Image (spheres, helix red, strand yellow):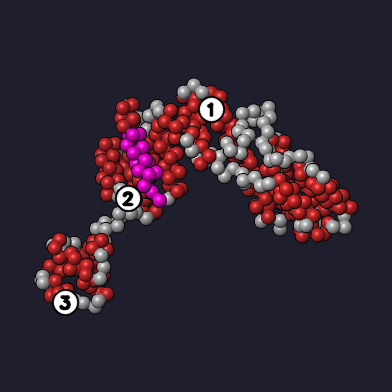
């Protein structure tokens, strides 16, 4: 952990200038013994000497003091483990007092504040059985204040999002579900799906069962489509391992079928079928490549435009408007003309399928998708 390090700074800067302690003492108008005590932390320079020292070394007073109100990641991690051990073995209030001193000292170190708040609720609300409800509420409130500071003051967007989630967690612990709803409903398109669990819990606490189901159902569907969306990138790395590639295709096809993704959100599976066809072509498995292209063409020619999400018997509450989808769930829809052209180009002008150009089945697929797109 970083402290005020004026002793280290004076020593290092003096040596950089190739000066003796006596040289520095003469310049500052003090004794050599005084400089020695400064460098061994036995005493500090008089406050009126600080500007002259800083000017002599051509640094700011802050740099001279060596005060670094930040902690590096490793120090934060070590401190968290150390305090966790103390919570398990020492009186709770004694450890909390130490925690409060640390947060005051590093009040602008936002990663530390976030972890300290997490530590508070982990031990104050979930681990120490001897605490009563009032004590737990007090600790949750204290943690919430740390998270609010991080959300409002940290320049790190990721920390802000984590802080938002943790503020909502504290509100749940404090029995304030309406606050959670207010937090997330005002920024529904900007929060990660993990917050939907908290929002659902808040709805449930206020008796809004349908809204609670909607949040969780939508979160489940978002997770499934996200997995399917990532698969093509992973497949591209595995084409040299036919066994692994085959297993990826098998599991993805089963996932699509099990959750009905092709019927609910056909646009989400098109990249998979195209990537699977590309990989099979590269591996000279023509029949399977054409099977994947059959699926691709089937979706492209069955009026899936405009891009929409449809409900089914299971996903009967999911959000179907792109305006309601969590931010980042899908690409912003393009105009239909450009989408149609890209669908044709994906098969007809794709160099990956050059080995299939003489294949009659491939030619029929190209003709089918081209005619369909041109006539609609």
Whole-number angstrom distance, CA of label 2 to CA of label 1: 37 Å
One can see residue 291 in this view: no
Badge 1 crowding class, 10 Å Cα cut-off, few under 14, some 14 to 19, many 20 or more, is many
One can see residue 305 in this view: yes
Query: Residue 5 appears at what percent x and percent y?
Result: 25, 61
Residue at image coords 86%, 52%: 363
Whether label 2 touches label 1, CB < 8 Å: no
Is residue 28 toward the left or the right of residue 281 in the image? left
Pick the residue in front: 249 or 184. 184
Q: Which range is magenta?
A: 139-155
Image: 361 above or below 123: below
Residue 212's disc number: 1
Whether label 3 touches label 2, CB < 8 Å: no
* Residue 322 among those drawn in magenta: no
Ranked by sequence position, the earlier of labels 3 and 1 is: 3
Residue at image coords 40%, 37%: 167
Residue 23's disc number: 3
């Amino acid at each position: 952990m970083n402290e005020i390090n004026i002793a280290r700074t004076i020593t290092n800067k003096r040596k950089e200038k190739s000066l003796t302690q006596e040289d520095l003492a003469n310049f500052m108008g003090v004794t050599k013994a005084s400089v020695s005590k400064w460098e061994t932390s036995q005493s500090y320079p008089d406050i009126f000497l600080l500007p002259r020292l800083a000017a002599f070394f051509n640094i700011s007073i802050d740099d001279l003091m060596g005060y670094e109100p930040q902690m590096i990641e490793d120090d934060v991690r070590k401190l968290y483990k150390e305090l966790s051990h103390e919570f398990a073995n020492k009186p709770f209030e004694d450890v909390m007092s130490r925690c409060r001193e640390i947060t005051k000292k590093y009040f602008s170190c936002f990663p530390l504040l976030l972890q300290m708040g997490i530590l508070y609720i982990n031990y104050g609300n979930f681990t120490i059985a001897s605490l009563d409800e009032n004590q737990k509420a007090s600790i949750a409130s204290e943690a919430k204040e740390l998270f609010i500071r991080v959300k409002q003051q940290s320049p790190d967007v990721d920390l802000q999002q984590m802080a938002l989630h943790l503020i909502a967690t504290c509100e749940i612990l404090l029995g304030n579900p309406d606050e959670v709803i207010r937090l997330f409903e005002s920024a529904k398109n900007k929060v990660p799906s993990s917050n939907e669990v908290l929002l659902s819990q808040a709805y449930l606490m206020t008796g809004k069962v349908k809204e609670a189901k909607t949040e969780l159902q939508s979160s489940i569907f978002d997770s499934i489509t996200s997995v399917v969306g990532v698969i093509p990138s992973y497949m591209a790395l595995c084409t040299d391992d036919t066994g692994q590639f085959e297993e990826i295709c098998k599991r993805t096809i089963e996932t699509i079928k099990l959750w009905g993704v092709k019927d609910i959100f056909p646009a989400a599976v098109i990249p998979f079928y195209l990537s699977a066809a590309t990989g099979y072509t590269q591996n000279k498995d023509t029949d399977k490549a054409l099977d994947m292209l059959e699926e691709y063409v089937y979706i492209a020619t069955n009026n899936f435009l405009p891009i929409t999400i449809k409900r089914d018997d299971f996903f009967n509450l999911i959000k179907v408007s792109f305006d309601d989808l969590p931010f980042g769930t899908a690409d912003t829809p393009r105009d239909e003309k450009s989408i149609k052209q890209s669908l044709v180009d994906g098969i007809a002008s794709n160099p990956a399928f050059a080995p299939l150009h003489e294949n009659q089945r491939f030619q029929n697929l190209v003709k089918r998708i081209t005619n369909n797109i041109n006539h609609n």
